[in-house]
Image: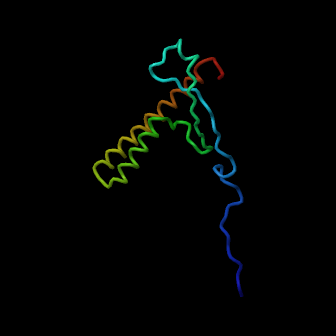
Amino acid sequence: TIRPPLFLTPKYSPLINHVRPSMKTIKVWPAGADSVLQDSITTTKRITTYPNQKPWMNKEVRLLLKARNTAFRSGEAQAYSTARTNLRRGIKKAKHTYKRKIEGHFSSSDPR
């Protein structure tokens, strides 16, 4: 007898597929801009937030991740090993900082 093909697709749709990334436009002021000039300078930047992005992911971790990938593509074993170690430490630090931030919200009386 001929058996029908077995499709191993899940019945649920993963979060990354059924929720679209959100685009935000934020104002960014140059480092040298004084508080007086911040009203006249309107530099905007678009950032994309994905639904499966971890809450502790920050700019430093993204830069370390980029450095690790660059070191991998370069083919240098020592540079790649160092970059991996730095990334692991950066992730631990980011998670710890996020944990402190959340604990601070619970310990303060402000519900936000």
Identify the residue at image location x=60%, y=43%.
50
Vertical placement of residue 27 versus 18, above or below = above
> Number of numbered discs present?
0
In the image as oriented, which residue stretches furthest toward the left? Answer: 78
The C terminus lies in quadrant = top right
Identify the residue at image location x=60%, y=45%.
52
Q: Position of residue 104 (x, y in %)?
A: 55, 23
The N terminus lies in quadrant = bottom right
In the image as oriented, which residue stretches furthest toward the top? Answer: 36
82 displayed left or right of 64: left
User: 40 or 46: which is nearer to us?
Assistant: 40
Vertical placement of residue 33 versus 92, above or below = above
Q: Position of residue 51 (x, y in %)?
A: 63, 43
- Which quarter of the picture shows residue 49? top right
Identify the residue at image location x=56%, y=37%.
55
Q: Position of residue 4 (x, y in %)?
A: 71, 78
Identify the residue at image location x=52%, y=23%.
29
User: 17 or 105: which is nearer to us?
Assistant: 17
